Amino acid sequence: MKKKKFSFRGLPFLAFVVVLYIVLYFFYPEKITLSFGKSLHLFVKVLPIFGIVILATTLINLLVEPKKFSKHLGEEAGFKGWLIALIAGVISHGPMYAWYPMFSELKKHGLKNGLIATFFYARAVKLPLLPLMADYFGIAFTAILTLYILIASLLQGFIIDKICPANSK
């Protein structure tokens, strides 16, 4: 088995941001200090989500055989795969970008692009906020809008599958 070399593709961007912070600090020290503090606060807030995603990715790599995974979420997934993506999208929480590393790994095991799109689109439905939405806009509106979002997420997934096949980057 060929050992993969780890590469941090975001290093140039990180370096750019650090240099930008240093340069701007000389012109606006108060604003940069405030900005850095807010960035640090956001990082601390997101850290647990990253930990969960890293743990899930590790477990997937260790426990899931690509053939079994492909059966549920790969090319041969069928209706079951679309349903899993839809439900997982609705119940998922946290910032969207926290899921990117896990989906990158899952894609290496055969996850279809359409299922990724369906997952991200279905995240527009927020279960904890549905009662509040129903209170403001009514049950009928909430139910119809939720149904439309779920249908649209499936359509988006189908379209992405046609435009970007699973083997494309």
Image (cartoon, rainbow, N blue to C red):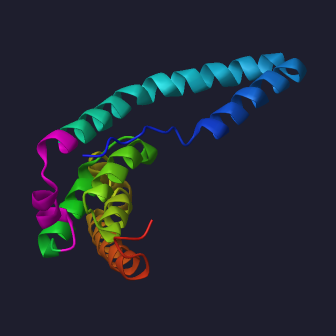
Give the number of marks.
Answer: 0
Q: Is residue 104 magenta?
A: no
- Residue 29 is left or right of residue 120, and the answer is right
Closer to us: 90 or 137: 90
- Residue 156 is left or right of residue 57, and the answer is right
The structure residue drawn at horizontal position 32% and vertical position 43%, both measured from the top left corner, is: 93
Q: Is residue 72 magenta?
A: yes
In this view of the protein, can residue 37 be seen by the observer?
yes
The structure residue drawn at horizontal position 18% and vertical position 38%, both measured from the top left corner, is: 59
Q: Give the percent coordinates (x, y) of residue 149.
A: 34, 69
Q: Residue 5, located in which quarter of the rendered image?
A: top left
The structure residue drawn at horizontal position 38% and vertical position 55%, both measured from the top left corner, is: 136
- Residue 62 is left or right of residue 160, and the answer is left
Tell me if residue 57 comes above or below residue 154 in the rendering. Answer: above
The stretch of residues the image draws in magenta is: 60-75
Closer to us: 141 or 146: 146
In this view of the protein, can residue 141 be seen by the observer?
no
Name of the residue lying farthest toward the front: 1
Q: Give the percent coordinates (x, y) of residue 146.
A: 30, 66
Tell me if residue 148 comes above or below residue 110 in the rendering. Answer: below
The structure residue drawn at horizontal position 14% and vertical position 75%, both measured from the top left corner, is: 79
Tell me if residue 80 comes above or below residue 19 in the rendering. Answer: below
Q: Residue 30, located in which quarter of the rendered image?
A: top right
Quarter containing the C terminus: bottom left
Q: Give the percent coordinates (x, y) of residue 53.
A: 31, 38
Name of the residue lying farthest toward the right: 27
Tell me if residue 31 comes above or below residue 74 in the rendering. Answer: above
Q: Give the percent coordinates (x, y) of residue 125.
A: 33, 57
- Dominant SS of magenta comes to helix
